[in-house]
């Protein structure tokens, strides 16, 4: 049976349709979940898409984390369900405390929309399960606040516990340790700044994002324990 | 007695006041005067240009809605239509660049989604003064940041645009913005108020004192040298809120999809006055507006302020009483404020009341604000120095024996140089449609949008904006025709058939007879080119009073052209070369000497802006356009680039830079020919000698002049007897220019 | 109940890079200004809080800072409570 991907829509989200299109093309069923809902209604995986939830007021993700739907997302994550935050979704997961660290303004103080080269690190996260470590992927970034920041001891712990999911081959925004995406300790909650859905069709210049999205759909079909 | 000094301070002439008195058959009060002053402003009424605009061709079988509505709408087949519009926000951007540009994006998007279309693309043609001037740099950086800040957050990709730099824009930059949206044909709605008893629901932001009289004070007068006068204009600039607009887009599209609105109209220039009078008069109805019901941002606002405020992110929906509850529910779901502020009446009058069933503050025929507006046949006269300028042929300029240094200087000119610094700040990819991104001759998008059923097959669209004030200053008629040709060829190199054109006519002070002559000539040149190229004009905007300290800008008509690609299965040819490729010039020959009149080379390197533009053959350009579409569809074109600013030399250099490959070119007549900007020419890269010969045969059969220029080889651009420069050196000049000027 | 005007100043924690502050500091010599250093950019948030006394007002706002107004990973806040005014 095809996996059902729940895609959370906050006011100001704008990549929800893109994620839906990309996962549908890979055979999944996409369902948009409005932020005022309190249930994920049987989703096998959850994506928090990119955009500007609540207009990025105060800090990106700072208000979205209090949306009614987030309690359901936290419960789903606690049960080991795969949860991926892309770009603004990554910022929401960090604000919600589901992922370590924070995202600051890019070091160059400019918005960056460009393709970057990513290198996969962990082989066990919901987004990179069974993807050989060191796989190079061309995927676009599209953000102003994507500079990953965490305390030195937190960064050291991320490496020790295999929580670095993807890193930049050529750091575009000043992120600590070239980190482009991280997971929680269990590996089922992942956040990354690059947009895999934007590299999902040959006409868009790259299909490499499908490697990550395919891994997510596989994770969705697995018992939660397999991720650990 | 009408208060004439007050009327004048609102920008109304004495003749216009007479006209208002005749319409009302009595003296207008203050509120009525203010309403007429904004509606009859140059910005809203087109009173100086409308008698000329009628000469543009506007009809074609696929045109569903032509000029005069919020946006032009054309049928793309398969039940999908596209809505397109272009606007300017020149004056607000000169005063407060970030907000001026941001609210320009917001305003044009409302024109698109008010017609039921999901906005899927924005393009920004920009004109600034020289970037080594701190003020121009401040404007340029602020404008780009504003487009980025608003466009990215509102969730509509910015897929292209242009950046051109010329001293004539130093005091008066041009910030134009084009938006395009898609809709199911059956969802098409127009801004109409009909059905007596239907309710006027104001959606979105509160109404504040910002932007009062923006259209009459800001958009309909030039800039003076008096700093105090200019500083006083600042409160007229509005602040944009992309998050409010994003929620408005979602709420309005859902409203229209569910059939809950009789009509929807955006609030733009002239605010509530324009929105209520236009919807009422187009619907053949009247309307009552209750001022106290309008949610106000600050206490103590006067009715005249409420009625003329240009606060951003507001829409007016006409709703039946039965649907009101559903509309309010829907608005609440998106956290959008929705308030009933009036109702449709059968009187044909627009009445402003202090509250429902309260005191009548203004009472005018709804149609009169629009239909009785003045139209001026302002005096037209060619500039006094026209004959002298035409006679001053640039053939007298010294031609270099080694053209390399001049070529490098042109590549580093901001009008030509790499614009990555600009478009990297724009989200150009949202909706997974962008096949060819900013920086190319035309943007190419897949024809689809959320909430719009997929068109049959794999259709795509190509869109581009073009303008060239330098050509138009020499000859506004031919210069404008050349601009239309350039845009048409840009979409043709992407394999797209012409669908429609929108224009933004940026000119100086219409009270100067020379400016009116330029405007009239430009419209004629546009009409001639559009007829030849099968491009119906489906919308436009006229921006006048682009002047600073008494000096008018160069006439700068900017056009947006949209084309349809029947099968977008592989990316169309880019600006690039392939190994072993052969270069073919189509639409002209380079072995015959051509003039540099109007070229960037003559202007930038010799300060020469005179002479007669090289002749333009519109029929041949049309044949070339059709040939290109066929060649691309047949898979024969592996790279393509039109010959424009900087001439053939820059065209070849950019092809080399983009691919990192060199080229050896023979038989270019002389330096003048290398830098000539004669119109209607494209260089294509064929996949080898045989393929090039095939293209040449097809060109001959199609009646398109052509020349095989040379081959892709080596690591330098070598043009026999004229240029030999390593591609790496060309690349450095082209890529380094903007980052060294802008932060 | 009296109302207190409260000012929250949010700044990046010591040791967290502040590219905006650094950019401003680098530009100062261009303006001919010397002897200025330690530029840090933050934000100011003003609130009006109804509370029985200024200690309670401070407690309410400090709790808000911890849960919402700052991101403790990168930000600190200082809270200043101004004299009460009756509503």
Image (cartoon, rainbow, N blue to C red):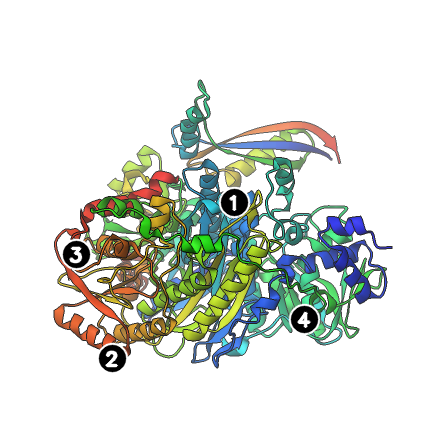
- Helix, strand or loop at disc 1? helix
Instruction: Point out which mark residue B611 bears.
Output: none
Q: Which comes sooner in the sequence, label 1 or label 2?
A: 1
Chain to which the residue tagged by mark 3 belongs: B
| Label 2 vs 3, first from the N-terminus | 3
First-in-chain label (1 vs 3): 1
Asked whether disc 2 touches disc 4, contact meaning CB atoms under 8 Å apart, the reply is no
Q: Are marks 1 and 2 in contact (CB under 8 Å)?
A: no
User: Mark on residue B319?
Assistant: 4
Residue pointed to by mark 3: B663
* Cα distance in 3D space between marks 1 and 3: 42 Å
* Residue topped by disc 1: B97
Tell whether B67 sits left or right of C37: right
- Chain at numbered mark 1: B
Judging depth in this view, the residue of B400 and B268 nearest the camera is B400
Q: Earlier in the sequence, mark 2 or mark 4?
A: 4
In percent of the image, x 16 and y 73: which residue is there? B693
Q: Secondary structure at mark 2?
A: helix
Taking B36 as reference, is A108 above or below it? above
Chain that bears disc 4? B
Q: Is residue B463 visible?
A: no
Compute the Cα span from label 3 to label 4. 64 Å
Q: Is residue B603 above or below residue B255?
A: above
**Coordinates of residue B730 in the picture (x, y in percent):** 23, 47
Mark 3 residue element = strand
Residue hosting label 2: B701
Separation of residues labelled 2 and 3 (CA atoms)? 27 Å
């Amino acid at each position: 049976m095809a996996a059902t991907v729940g895609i959370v829509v906050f006011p100001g989200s704008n990549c929800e349709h893109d994620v839906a299109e990309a996962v549908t093309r890979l055979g999944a069923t996409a369902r948009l979940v409005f932020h005022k809902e309190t249930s994920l209604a049987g989703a096998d995986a959850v994506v928090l898409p990119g955009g500007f939830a609540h207009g990025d007021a105060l800090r990106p993700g700072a208000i979205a984390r209090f949306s009614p739907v987030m309690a359901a997302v936290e419960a789903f994550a606690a049960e080991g369900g795969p949860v991926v935050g892309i770009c603004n979704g990554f910022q929401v997961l960090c604000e919600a405390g589901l992922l370590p660290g924070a995202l600051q303004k890019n070091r160059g103080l400019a918005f960056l929309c460009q393709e970057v080269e990513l290198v996969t690190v962990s082989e066990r996260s919901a987004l990179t399960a069974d993807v050989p470590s060191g796989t190079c992927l061309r995927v676009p970034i599209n953000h102003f606040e994507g500079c990953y920041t965490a305390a030195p001891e937190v960064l050291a712990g991320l490496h020790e516990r295999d929580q670095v999911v993807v890193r930049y081959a050529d750091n575009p925004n000043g992120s600590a340790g070239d980190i482009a995406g991280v997971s929680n300790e269990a590996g089922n909650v992942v956040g990354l700044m690059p947009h895999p859905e934007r590299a999902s069709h040959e006409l868009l210049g790259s299909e490499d994002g499908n490697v990550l999205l395919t891994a997510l759909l596989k994770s969705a079909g697995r018992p939660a324990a397999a991720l650990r | 007695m009408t208060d004439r000094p007050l009327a004048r301070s609102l920008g109304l002439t004495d003749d216009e006041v007479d006209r208002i008195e005749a319409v009302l058959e009595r003296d207008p009060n203050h509120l009525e005067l203010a309403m007429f002053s904004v509606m009859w402003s140059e910005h809203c009424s087109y009173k100086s240009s409308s008698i000329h605009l009628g000469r543009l061709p506007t009809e074609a079988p696929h045109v569903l809605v032509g000029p005069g509505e919020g946006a032009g709408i054309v049928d793309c087949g398969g039940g999908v239509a596209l809505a397109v519009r272009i606007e300017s926000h020149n004056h607000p951007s000169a005063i407060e660049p970030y907000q001026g540009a941001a609210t320009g994006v917001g305003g044009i998007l409302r024109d698109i989604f008010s017609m039921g279309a999901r906005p899927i693309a924005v393009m920004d043609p920009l004109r600034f003064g020289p970037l080594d001037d701190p003020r121009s740099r401040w404007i340029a950086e602020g404008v780009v940041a504003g487009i980025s800040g608003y466009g990215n957050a509102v969730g509509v990709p910015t897929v292209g645009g242009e950046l051109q730099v010329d001293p004539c824009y130093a005091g008066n930059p041009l910030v134009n913005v084009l938006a395009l949206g898609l809709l199911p044909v059956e969802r098409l709605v127009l801004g109409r108020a009909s059905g007596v008893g239907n309710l006027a629901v104001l959606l979105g932001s509160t109404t504040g004192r910002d932007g009062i009289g923006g259209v009459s004070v800001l958009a309909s007068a030039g800039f003076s040298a008096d700093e105090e006068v200019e500083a006083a204009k600042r409160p007229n600039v509005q602040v944009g809120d992309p998050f409010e607009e994003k929620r408005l887009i979602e709420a309005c599209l859902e409203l229209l999809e569910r059939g809950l609105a009789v009509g929807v109209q955006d609030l733009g220039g002239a605010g509530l006055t324009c929105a209520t009078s236009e919807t009422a008069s187009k619907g053949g109805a009247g309307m009552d507006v209750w001022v106290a019901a309008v949610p106000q941002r600050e206490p103590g606002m006067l009715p005249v302020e409420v009625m003329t405020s240009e606060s951003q992110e507001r829409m007016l929906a006409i709703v039946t009483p039965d649907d009101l509850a559903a509309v309010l529910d829907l608005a609440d779901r998106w956290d959008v404020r929705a308030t009933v502020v009036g109702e449709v009446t059968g009187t044909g009058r627009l009445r402003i009341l202090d509250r429902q069933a309260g005191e009548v503050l203004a009472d005018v025929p709804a149609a009169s604000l629009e239909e009785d507006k003045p139209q001026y046949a302002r005096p037209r006269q060619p500039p006094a120095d026209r004959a002298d300028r035409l006679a001053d042929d640039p053939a007298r300029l010294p031609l270099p024996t080694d053209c390399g240094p001049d070529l490098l200087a042109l590549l580093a000119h901001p009008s030509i140089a790499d614009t990555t610094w600009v478009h990297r700040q724009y989200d150009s990819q949202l909706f997974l449609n962008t096949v060819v991104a900013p920086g190319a001759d035309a943007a190419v998008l897949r024809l689809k949008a959320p909430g719009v059923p997929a068109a049959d097959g794999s259709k795509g669209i190509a869109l581009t904006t073009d303008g060239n004030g330098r050509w138009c200053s020499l000859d506004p008629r031919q210069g404008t025709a050349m601009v239309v040709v350039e845009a048409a060829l840009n979409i043709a190199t992407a394999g797209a058939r012409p669908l429609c054109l929108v224009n933004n006519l940026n000119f100086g002070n219409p009270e100067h007879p020379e400016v009116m002559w330029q405007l009239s000539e430009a419209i004629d040149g546009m009409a001639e080119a559009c007829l030849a190229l099968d491009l119906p004009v489906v919308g436009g905007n006229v921006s006048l009073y682009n002047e600073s300290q008494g000096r008018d800008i160069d006439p700068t008509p900017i056009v947006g052209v949209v084309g349809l690609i029947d099968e977008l299965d592989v990316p169309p040819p880019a600006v690039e070369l392939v190994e072993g490729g052969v270069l073919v010039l189509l639409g002209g020959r380079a072995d015959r000497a051509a003039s540099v009149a109007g070229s960037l080379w003559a202007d930038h390197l010799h300060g020469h802006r005179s002479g007669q533009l090289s002749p333009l053959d519109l029929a041949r350009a049309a044949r070339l356009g059709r040939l290109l579409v066929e060649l691309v569809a047949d898979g024969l074109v592996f790279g393509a680039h039109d010959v424009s600013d900087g001439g053939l030399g820059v065209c070849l250099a950019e092809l080399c830079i983009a691919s990192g490959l060199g080229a050896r070119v023979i038989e270019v007549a002389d330096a003048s020919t290398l830098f000539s900007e004669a119109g209607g020419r494209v260089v294509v890269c064929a996949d080898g000698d045989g393929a090039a010969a095939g293209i040449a045969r097809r060109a001959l059969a199609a009646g398109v002049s052509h020349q095989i220029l040379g081959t892709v080889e080596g690591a330098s651009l070598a043009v026999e007897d004229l240029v030999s420069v390593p591609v790496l050196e060309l690349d450095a000049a082209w890529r380094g220019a903007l980052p060294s000027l802008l932060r | 109940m009296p109302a207190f005007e409260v000012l929250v100043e949010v700044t990046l924690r010591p040791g967290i890079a502040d590219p905006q502050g650094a950019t401003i500091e680098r530009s100062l010599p261009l303006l001919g200004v010397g002897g200025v250093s330690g530029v840090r950019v933050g934000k100011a948030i003003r609130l009006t809080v109804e509370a029985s006394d200024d200690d309670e007002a401070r407690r309410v706002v400090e709790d808000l800072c911890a849960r919402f107004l700052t991101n403790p990973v990168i930000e600190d806040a200082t809270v200043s409570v101004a004299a009460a005014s009756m509503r």
